Amino acid sequence: MAGNWGISVVASIVFLFALVLADCSQAQPQNGSGSDWPGFLGPGRDGKSSETGFDWDWKKRPPKLAWSRASPGGYGIGSVADGRYFHFDRDGDFERVLCLDATSGKELWKFVYPTGYRDMYGFDNGPRCSPVIDEDRVYLLGAEGMLHCLNVVSGEVVWKINTSRQFNVVPYFFGVGSTPIVHGNLLIAMIGGGPAHPGDDDRRIRIEAAKPDDCAIVAFDKLTGAVRYTAIDDLASYAAPVVVHVQDDAVGLVFCRSGLHGFDPSTGSHKWSFPWRSRKYESVNASTPVMFGNNVLITEAYGPGGAVLELSGEEPRVVWQDEPVRDQRLACHWCTPVVVDGFAYACHGEKTSEAELRCIDLATGETRWSEPGMGRLNLLYADGQLLCLEEYGSLLVVRADPEKFQLTTEYVPPDGGPGIAAPCFAAPILSQGRLLFRDANQVYCYELPKLEAK
C-alpha cells in the first residue's frame, strides 16, 4: 500500500511537471524593457506605450516582417500577454479567436462559435471589440453580444452569456463594439439593454423605439459570469468604459448614447451625468474618454464636438466645450485622442475628405496645428512618436510635438510589394518591440528596429 502511494505521488509530480512544460512550450513570456498590451488601447486604455529606444529612420532600417496571418473579417485588433497574441475575427459564419505565439505567429489554439450578425449598412460583419486578457482568462464580446470567458492556455470555455438576449438589447447601427474592462473581480461591459421590445423585423424602427432600462453597464463576476450589478439609465454606444482615479478615488467613466456618466466601478452607484449627444438620429459616441490629471476629454464627430471636464467636485465642471456644429475644436469619429504633456493629438472630422490630424492645447482648446489630407486614422503613441494608421493603408510616424507637424518617417512596402489593404479601422498596438496592425485581409507583426548601442 505504501509502495503504491509512493508511485502515485511520483506519477503525479511527473504529470504536473509535464503540464508545466507543455504550457511553457506554447508561448514564452517576454522579458526586458517591453510590456504587454492586454486589451483595447493598451495597459492604460489610452493608446500609449511605455517602450522606448527605437530607430525611427525607416529609410535606412525599415521594420522587419516577423509574420502575418489571414484575417477575413472584423474591425478590431488583438491583444498580447505572456508571449501570446489573441486575435478576434470572423471566418464565414463563425466568430473566432486565434491564440498565436506572439514571436512566430504559430497557432496555439483556436476557438469558434456560430454567428448570424449582418451589418445593417453593409459594412464588415466581424467583431469590433478587442480581447481582454486578465491572468489566465481572456474575454471576448462579439458583434451580436455573445460574451465568452476562455482559458488562455487551452481555449476552453470558462463561462458564456448571450448579453443581447439576457438584457433585451436592440442591435444598434454597427452591432456591439464597446470593449469591456476588468476592475478587481469584475468584468464591466457596456450593454445598454431595455424593456422587452416588439419583434419588429425593421431594425431601424426597433432602434428608434428602444428605451433604456438601467443597464447601460453590467458588471459580471469575472470568474463565474454571475451578474453583480446593473447601472445607468442609458443605451449603449461604441466608446469603451474606463476606470480612472480622481483624488485617490476610483471612478468609472462610460460614454453612452446620450452622454458621459460617472459611477463607482465597485458597486455601480451612479455619481453624475453630462449630456453630450448629436441631434442626428444616425449618430454614435465612439471615441473613448481620455483622463489627464483630474480632467477628462470627450469628443464625437456628429454635432457637439469636444469638451474637457474637471472632475474634482461632485459634478463635472466644464473647462471648455465646443458649440454644436460650429467651428469645433476637436470632433473625433472613432479615433481616441492620445494625450501627451497637456496636448491632445487626434483625427478631427467625420468624413474622409474633411479629416485632419490635429494637436489641441487641452487647457484652452486652442488648435496648435493641423495637417489636412491624411484621411481618417488611428493613433498609437510610443517613444515620443505618433504611429498613424490611415484608413486607406498608409502607416506614418509623426513626432508628438505641439509646436509643429513633423513627419518622422513612413512605411514603404519592400521591393514594390503589396501595400496595406483598405479599410484599416483599428489602432495599431506595440508589445515587446513588435508592432501589430491589421488591414482588410490580414494581421501583421513587424519587429521595430532598435537604436544601436554606441
Image (cartoon, rainbow, N blue to C red):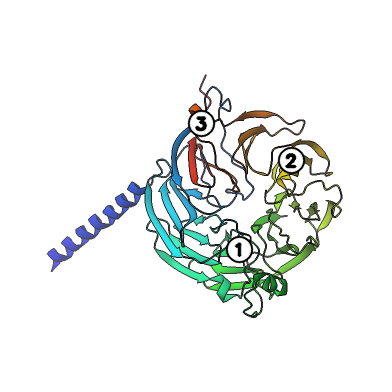
What residue is at 19 percent from the left and 63 percent from the top? Answer: 8
| Residue 209 % position (x, y) | 71, 75
| Residue 214 % position (x, y) | 68, 74
What residue is at 57 percent from the left and 32 percent from the top? Answer: 411
Q: Which mark is residue 175?
A: 1
What residue is at 66 percent from the left and 57 percent from the top? Answer: 239
Q: Which mark is residue 356?
A: 2
Q: Quadrant of residue 381?
A: top right
Q: Amino acid at mark 2?
A: Glu
Q: Amino acid at mark 1?
A: Gly
Q: Residues within 10 Å of mark 3 (few under 14, many from 20)?
A: many
Name the N-terminal-most of marks 2 and 3: 3
| Residue 241 % position (x, y) | 65, 59
Residue 120 lies, with reference to residue 437, above or below; the image says below
Between 91 and 188, the one nearer to me in the picture: 91
The residues tagged by marks 2 and 3 sit, at their Cα atoms, a distance apart of 26 Å
| Residue 266 % position (x, y) | 62, 66
Residue 318 lies, with reference to residue 164, above or below; the image says above
